Image (tube, grey):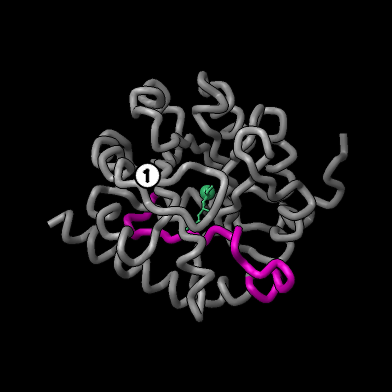
Amino acid sequence: MAIVSDLSATEARPPGSLAKLRMAAAPVVLPSLLKCDFGHLADQLALLEHGGVRALHLDVMDGHFVPNLTYGFPLVQAIRRATRLPLELHLMIENPGQYLSRYRDAGADGMTIHIEAVPEPAETLAEIRDLGASAGLALNPPTPLSAIEPFLADCDVVLVMSVMPGFGGQKFEPVAVEKIQRLAGRLSPGQAIEVDGGINDETIASCASAGAGWFVAGSAVFEAEDPATEVSRLTRLAAENQSQHQE
Ligand code: DX5
Ligand code: ZN
């Protein structure tokens, strides 16, 4: 079934680029494109890419798992064509297994599913890996860590939500820091701890010192005068706090 007809952009992407970021010790700030200027998408992506951004976070919402709607396949494909940056898709959708291969064909380098949508996620995570993408598992602020613990070995990325998913611009929930702390030290090299929601220059330090390595930031980046410079600034803040933690 050729839903996505032109795969040239997917074929051209650098292979394994999210995997390289997972292996590196340096923190990564991933802009969430929810608040970017979609009227000037290609220009915005070029500014981010040339400004040193290393990966992008796309919030896919289905109007069922969360009360909001965002990217379908054509938009992911358009973003894929406009940038060589790796694309991490945060799938806030029911039945994600149904769409994995099409999102992969559209250009996803990583796909993150929610434990609240897929309570037994081992098979779906294996499918993401089989497609050659990084497999992520997310949990919402009220969901206990115990819900994902049996599946840690099946994940390349554990995404700790610091807001309820669905909308950008919400207030950071500190319960995320506690979960990051408990996860740190339990994962192997190459498995990233990612935090998403309300990340800014006030909240990034506690997440970095707790042990997170990947930081999703939407409002902080796109409400800044220069989004790429803001990503660099947040990355520096994370790095400073990570190294303090390691000393
Ligand atoms: C929430 C999304 C987040 C969010 C990030 O559903 O998963 O990626 O949009 O945006 P800020 O940084 O504004 O919380
Ligand atoms: Zn997200």
Q: Quadrant of residue 239?
A: bottom left
- Quarter of the image for the N terminus: give it: top right
- Quarter of the image for the C terminus: give it: bottom left
Front position in the image: 149 or 135: 149
The answer to whether 114 is drawn above or below residue 45 in the figure is above
Residue 238 spot, x, y in % from top left:
30, 62
Residue at horizontal 33 percent and vertical 43 percent from the top: 176
Residue 132 spot, x, y in % from top left:
60, 39
Front position in the image: 220 or 146: 220
Question: Which residue is labeled 1 in the image?
Answer: 193
- Mark 1 element type: strand
Instruction: Tell me the magenta residue range.
Output: 23-44
User: Viewed as shown, does residue 122 lie left or right of 203?
Assistant: right
User: Viewed as shown, does residue 172 lie left or right of 165?
Assistant: left
Q: Quadrant of residue 85?
A: bottom right
Residue at horizontal 35 percent and vertical 28 percent from the top: 144
Residue at horizontal 59 percent and vertical 34 percent from the top: 128
Residue 59 spot, x, y in % from top left:
60, 49
Type of amino acid at the residue the image marks with label 1: Ile
